[in-house]
Amino acid sequence: MLRLLRAVISRDLRLAMRRQADIVAAMFFFIIVVSLFPLGVGPEPAQLRRLAPGVLWVAALLASMLSLPRLFADDHRDGTLEQLALAPQPLGLIVLAKVIAHWLVAGLPLVLLAPVLGIQFDLGADALVVLMLSLLLGTPALSGIGAIGAALTLGVRGGGVLLSLLVLPLYIPVLIFGAGAVDATVSGLGPQAHLSLLGALALGGVFFAPWPTAAALRVALE
Amino acid sequence: MSNRVINWFRYASPQTFYPLAGQLIPWFWALAALFGALGLTIGFLLAPTDAQQGEGYRIIFLHVPASWMSMFIYLVMAFWAATGLAFNTRLSGMMASALAPTGALFAFLSLWTGALWGKPMWGAWWVWDARLTSELILLFLYIGFIALQAAIDDPRRADKAGAILALVGVVNIPIIYFSVKWWNTLHQGASVSLTKAPSMAAMMLWGMLFCALACWMYSIAVALTRVRTIMLERERHTDWVRALLADKE
């Protein structure tokens, strides 16, 4: 089981490394979206500090969503996905491995980039730490929930737009608690409660999402 | 035992359900009209004017039933989705897709009438209140369901994909509801809340109940009408539909 997990993860990572442009593009999307807000709302530091948690989190949501359509599409096109579905190991496990790989490629870089962008918004050191923590806890949930949407829209026309329509409403709890944790730190309340709930969402999301995803993949492969 | 099972599934086939639905629809329309007339009469003529909100409160006779129905229909839709996945019955998926537009309509009505009520009472069309936000998200979930089904050409695949989405959504609804509630209480003080004065006049309550029943019967009637159309559309190549259409001509 663990060997399979490792094999799928390392395969997906190797494929992602061969196409680094995609990863870099998603990261720059994140940076550009975040940088647009000070230009749009004006550069007053006090206002930016108030907006920062929400803006950074919304941008992170969108950036991690950008790479979702490719989560299964390439494997679907060349038939790998069918072989994976035929494998004796449960499909849910393979999905879990792909979710982890997606997080490593699309979620982790966001976590590492966020503090730099937070400085642009004049966030304090403790808020930056909480921002990183909240993203670290929240982005796995995004990858998990996103996988469901990616599997449902697999091979459907207009899949990209549809994917955002399906996935974004389901992202809302993660957004609320993620941005809420940073907000609570900025306003002097502790972030513990939000971070705990975010951790619960991440665990629940990563644990349960592979089941509906596998079901949706089987529907798509029929 | 086996006999009972057969009876249970008898109407799961579109061929037997189509005439049954056709017979039931007029009854549900009649009930909807009756309850609607009762509810509106009580609501507009008999119910007393509210001490604090004046006549403007009367929109609750549409607003509250619409909100209830929007949530209830989602649950029913998820139930049919689960049944469809579990028993692989064709009709379940059709029921789910027949219910979705009505549910979306009620979610929209609930938001719309809420805005009409909010303007004179709160002084704002829209407030980021917990209930408003979660109702809005519910509307998004309905739209996502409808869009997903519309995007998939093969109806069987559309049913199954929609069913998975509906079930994921139904798991998420409590999470969304509570997260929105907690988020809201942290951001702004509870300056507004939808909770009404605890003692509601009995007349108002009756009016609201009748209107809720009217909305419920209306939903059933419309969903059955829609499911009949969907059945004809999807089963157009079968013998019974051909025979039916030949009879009509």
Image (cartoon, coloured by chain):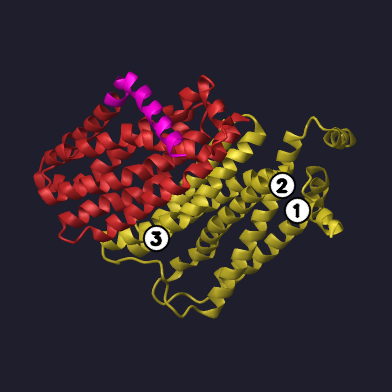
Q: Is residue B246 above or below residue B57?
A: above
Decide which of A130, B132 is in the foreground and name it: A130
Residue where numbered disc 2 is placed = B225
- Please state the chain letter of the residue tagged with numbered disc 2 in the rendered image: B
Earlier sequence position, callout 1 versus callout 2: 1
Asked whether residue A3 is drawn in magenta, I would say yes
Task: Between label 3 and label 1, give the one nearer the viewer.
Answer: 3
- Which secondary structure lies at badge 2? helix
Decide which of B156, A108 is in the foreground and name it: A108
Earlier sequence position, callout 3 versus callout 1: 1
Q: Which residues are the magenta region? A: A1-24
Asked whether residue A11 is drawn in magenta, I would say yes
Residue at position x 35%, y 27% in the image: A13
C-alpha span from label 3 to label 2: 35 Å
- Which secondary structure lies at badge 1? helix
Q: Position of residue B204 (x, y in %)?
A: 53, 74
Q: Evaluate whether label 3 is on the same chain as label 2.
A: yes
The numbered disc on residue B178 is 3
- Which secondary structure lies at badge 3? helix
The three-letter code of the residue at mark 2 reads: Thr
The C terminus of chain B, quarter of image: top right
The numbered disc on residue B25 is 1
